[in-house]
Image (cartoon, rainbow, N blue to C red):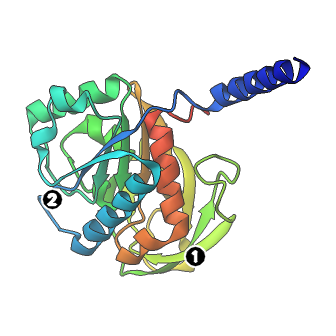
Amino acid sequence: MVKIILLLFFNFLINITSDNFYKKNDKISLLVFYETQGFVHEEAIREGKIMMSKIGNQKNYNIIFADNSDLFDGTYLDKVDVIIFLCTTLDVLDEKEEKAMKKFIRNGGGFIGIHSATDTEYEWEWYGKLVGAYFMNHPDIQKATIITEKESHFLTDHLKDSWSIKDEWYNFKDFNPDINVLLSLDETSYEGGENGDYHPISWYHEFDGGRSFYTGLGHVGETYNDPRFVKMINKAILYTSGLVTK
């Protein structure tokens, strides 16, 4: 009898602790959207889809891949937890679809932007605030040093305080001042940086009822096989879905 009581009490403590960090562990549904109206990141999109398929299989997520915006209607988006813009470019949503996406975020939906998601929807101010900044230009692909600004944060606590990787490094404009910077570029470690001492490359923030995560990494196909990047995307899914509450 004592053992049963202790076991029940132990399970109670586990549930309390878990509730501080996680919502109910429902199956997550993801829409991976990769329509392009400008430059097509063929290698990145291919490798990104492979990465997402592996994540989906490992975590038992529902994943739909879409290269057009037909699924951006209220009926379908009601079934989705997180929309991932995988290397989208330029104007990919019409006015009706923009309204559906706004409703999705305002109802608590999550958003993840990868690489050229900031090279998307320049004329839509709301989207610019959601993604957190807009692409300005970039130098040649090269290795750079990344500074982990939030070493103890859930999204980046697996990363060293500084680390290097080869990719295409965006310079940005029109930053949303409310973003929480996770990773920054050390502009002294490569050529062509134009943002100076404030050069975020990955960030997160709550916006208009939902949650947003963005990373500028992801032009180079090899990035999608880098365990550091893959783990960060895994965590971003948990954050933007609302499954992780701290």
- Give residue 192's position: percent from left, percent from top: 42, 76
**Which secondary structure lies at badge 1?**
strand
Above or below, comparing residue 18 to residue 120 in the picture: above
Tell me residue 26's x, y (percent).
45, 32
Q: Which numbered disc flags the more N-terminal residue, 2 or 1? A: 2
- In the displayed structure, 46 sits above or below 174; it is below
Query: What amino acid is at disc 1?
Result: Ser
Q: In which quarter of the image is residue 119?
A: bottom left
Q: Quadrant of residue 180?
A: top right
Q: Residue 107 carries which label?
A: none
Q: Is mark 2 on a helix, strand or loop?
A: loop
* Quarter in which the C terminus is drawn: top right
Q: In this view, does 72 lie above or below 107?
A: below
How far apart in space, not on screen, are marks 2 and 1 (Cα)?
A: 29 Å
Mark drawn on residue 36: 2
Q: Name the residue under label 1.
A: 164
Q: Nearer the viewer, residue 84 or 194?
A: 84
